Each structure stands twice: as structure tokens, then as C-alpha cells.
Image: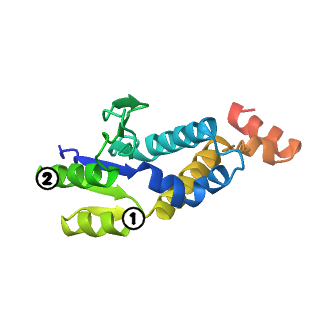
Amino acid sequence: MARKRNKLLIVDGYNVIRSGSRYSHMRNSPDYVHVTYNTVREKLISDVAAYAGHEYKAIIVFDGADNPSDAGKTQRIGGVKVVFSPAGTSADHVIERTAHDAAEKGIEVMVVTSDADIQDTVFGGGVDRMSANGFSFEVDDLHHEAQLDSNVSTKRRATVAERIDSDTLAKLKALRDGK
């Protein structure tokens, strides 16, 4: 039996929200306040959970470096590990370190970000990368496929008896029944 591949998806949370086309209508809202920000983060978490499915373990890293009260809290939501970088530590650093450590352990790693510095750093370590917009397109496709799957209808196949005229059907029944 083939072994399941160990794969990790690391998402640069605020970068994807700022750069991904899927989230542009939310971030361009004139009412870009705390509630709106939470809504966008929740949508990203939901999208990452759907994209990761059973193929990836997923981590989203949000930047908490400028928040002096942030201790780098971690929580699990819908199977996705959500991390806020601790005060004084950038999300970039957390992403790069996590990707490097996982790759060192032989884990296949995909980092989702449009930050060129992170992409260059992780790619040099043998890690795959995807842009924020690339992720947006992948998730849009995933949702489109799910919608198509939920709207599938099958047509009932007509039997031979339903497709021939009644006289022929009567003659066939008579032959079958030995009359």
C-alpha cells in the first residue's frame, strides 16, 4: 500500500487578503473596520480549509509583530492552524522558519504569498510557492466545481418498452409468454 505523502500548506494571511483577487471586494469596502476585517479573515480560513482538504495540513500566519500585546497565539479552526506572529516577530519570519523546518523533515511544503522576499527565501530551500492571486483562482475553481457537483441531475433512461409502439410491445410480450 502506498504511503500518504506528508504535505504542508502555509498561507501568508494578510498578504493573501491584500493581494488576492478573491478578497478584493471585501478589502475595498469603505467600512473597512474590525468587523469587516474579521469577516475577510474568516473567509480566508474557510477557503484554506476547503483547498487543503485531506491533501494538506494547513497553517495561516497573520502578522502580529506590531501588536505589543500579541503573544503569538495559535488556534485551530476547521482543521486549519491559525497563527498570529508574536510581538516583535514578523509573519514573514514565522513563515520562512516553518517552511524551512518542515522541508528539513522531508515534508512537501507549499507557501502561498505574493511577497517576493518570502518567495525567494522559501524557493531557495526547495519549497513550492503560489501567489495570492493563483490561490484566489484555485479556490474560485474549487467552489465552481463544488457548485456544479451539487447541481448534477441525471436523466432517467428510457427502457425499450417505453420506446416502441404498443402493438409491437404486445407482440413481443406474446412471444415471451409463449402465446
Closer-to-camera residue (6/103): 103
Q: Which residue is mark 1?
A: 115
Amino acid type, mark 2: Gly
Q: Image quarter for residue 92? A: bottom left
Residue 106 got which mark? 2
Q: Nearer the viewer, mark 2 or mark 1?
A: 1
Closer-to-camera residue (74/161): 74
> x%, y% of residue 13?
43, 49
Classify residue 108 as left or right of residue 66.
left
Classify residue 10 as left or right of residue 28.
left
Marks 2 and 1, how far apart at CA: 24 Å
Q: Residue at x 31, y 56 (%)?
A: 110
Task: Classify mark 1: residues with Cα within 10 Å, few (<14), some (14-19) or many (20+).
Answer: some
Residue 27 higher or lower than 129, as above or below: above
Task: Classify mark 2: residues with Cα within 10 Å, few (<14), some (14-19) or many (20+).
Answer: few
Classify residue 174 as left or right of residue 80.
right
Residue 107 appears in the picture as rendered: no
Q: Residue at x 25, y 55 (%)?
A: 96
Q: Residue at x 33, y 32 (%)?
A: 74
Residue 16 got which mark? none
